[in-house]
Image (cartoon, rainbow, N blue to C red):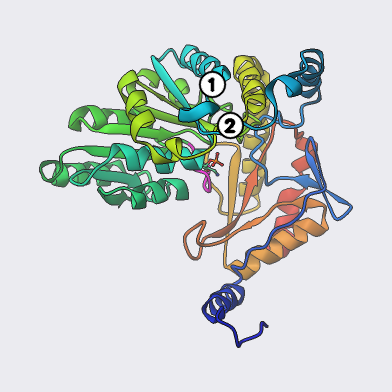
Amino acid sequence: MYDQNTKYQHFITDLDQLKSKDQFRSLVSISDKNNKYITIKDKKYLNLSSNDYLGLANDAELLEKFSEIVFKDKLINKLGMSSASSRLLTGNHELYEELEDELCKLYDREASIVFSSGYHANTGIISAITQKGDLILSDKLNHASIIDGMRLSRADFLRYNHLDYNHLKNLLESNLDKYKNILVISESIFSMDGDRTDLKKLVDLKNQYNTILMIDEAHAIGVFGEKGCGICEEDNLIQNIDIIVGTFGKALASVGAYAIINNILKEYLINKMRPFIFTTALPAFNLYWTLMIIKALPSFKFKREHLKDISDFLRNSIQDQGFVTGGESQIIPVIIGENDKTVKTAEKLKDAGIWLLPIRPPSVPEGTSRLRISLSASLEKTDISTIPDIIKGETL
Ligand code: PMP
C-alpha cells in the first residue's frame, strides 16, 4: 500500500491495521451546506449526520437579521475577525462579559464562563479542579473530551457502568474514605446512544456523598427544557448541579462552550485551567452571533417540539422494522454490529441520497458499530420516512 522503506514505518503499520479492520477515517470536502442538505462533489444529500439539532446553522431569517446588523453597524470593521490573544491578555472583548451575563440570567445562576470549545471545557475543567488524592467517577460512555480530561488530571479515575447508579453508589461507598474529594461526571444525553441520564439519581448521590457533580449537556442544550437549557432545566435541577457544561457548536449554531458554575469556581478556573489560559480567545464577531442565539433560545420552543415529534416517529418506525435502537432524543442509534456491514449500509444510504456516516470503534465499543442518525428540526417526516426500509434492504 505505502512505500515500506521509511522512518514512518510504524505509522504505516498502524494505518494498514485500521484499514484491515474497516476503521480507517478520511476527510470529505463539503462544498455547500444548506438547511437540511449538504453537497459533496456536486451531489446533494439529505444530511442526517449533523449536530445542528434546531436547524439554526442555515436559518435564513436569523442569518438575514445578523447580516443586516453586520452591514448597518459595520461589525466586521469594528470587531475584526480575530481576537489575536488569549482572554487573560488582550482577547477578553467586553462581549464575553455580555454573553456570560446573559447565560447567568438564562440559568438564574451566579456565574458562567465561556471557552473556545467543548473539548477545551471538558479537558480543562476536569484537570484543573481535581488533584492527586482526588477521585473522578465517570459514566463508561462519556465523551472522549471527558476521558482526555481525566487522563490529564493527576487524580485517580474509575468508570462506572453506563447509567448504572448502583454501581456508582458502590464505588462511592468503597472509595469515600480513601480520597480527599470526589468528582462525578456524566453527559445528560449521550452522544452515541441518544439515551438520557437520570439526573435526579445523580443529584441524590451528590448530596448523600458530598461530591462535586459535573453534567455535560452538549447534546441537550437547545433541545430540551422549556427555555432550551437542557435536561437540567427539564428535570428542574439547574440549582443542584455544581458544573453544567454546554457547547455552542451543536444546536446553538456557533462555536465555543460554557460552564454554569459559582463565583469561586469561576475565579479558580481563570487562574488554574490551562486550556482556558493558554489559548486564543474567540473572535468578538463570533461572540456577537452567539449572544444573539442565546437571547433567542427560549423562542425556539416550536422547533424543539417538532424535533421531538419527528424523532419519536423515526425511532418507532426503525423499531417496527426489527432493528436494535434506543435512546430518547434526537440522536437515534441503529446498532448494526460489525464494521463492514455498517460501512456497507452507510454506502447504500449514500446511493439513495442520504448522508449518514458509520460510527465505529474507538468512538463506540467493539461490536456495536452503528449508524448514528442525528435529526434536525429542519427535517420533515416525509424526508425521513423511507430510511427504515433502505436500512432493512441491506442488513437483514
Ligand atoms: N461533549 C460532548 C458530549 C460532545 O459530544 C462534544 C463534541 N462532539 C464535546 C463535548 C466537544 O465539544 P466541541 O465540539 O465544542 O469541542
Give the SS element for disc 2: loop
Q: Which residue is mark 2?
A: 282
Confirm or reject: label 2 Cβ below 8 Å from ligand 1: no
Q: Is residue 353 visible?
A: yes
Residue sitting at x 55%, y 77%: 17
Residue 152 percent location from the top left of the image: 35, 50
The amino acid marked with disc number 1 is Tyr
Per the rendering, the mark at residue 96 is: 1
Residue 327 percent location from the top left of the image: 52, 42
Residue 275 percent location from the top left of the image: 44, 40
The amino acid marked with disc number 2 is Leu
Which stretch appears magenta?
Answer: 189-194
- The alpha-carbon separation of the residues under discs 2 and 1 comes to 9 Å
Magenta includes 191?
yes
In the visual, does 162 lie left or right of 369? left
- Judge whether 164 appears above or below 3 on screen: above
Q: Say which quarter of the image contains residue 127.
A: top left
Q: Main secondary structure of the magenta part?
A: loop
Front residue of this view, candidates 139 and 122: 122
- Looking at the rendered image, the quarter that the N terminus falls into is bottom right
Give the SS element for disc 1: helix
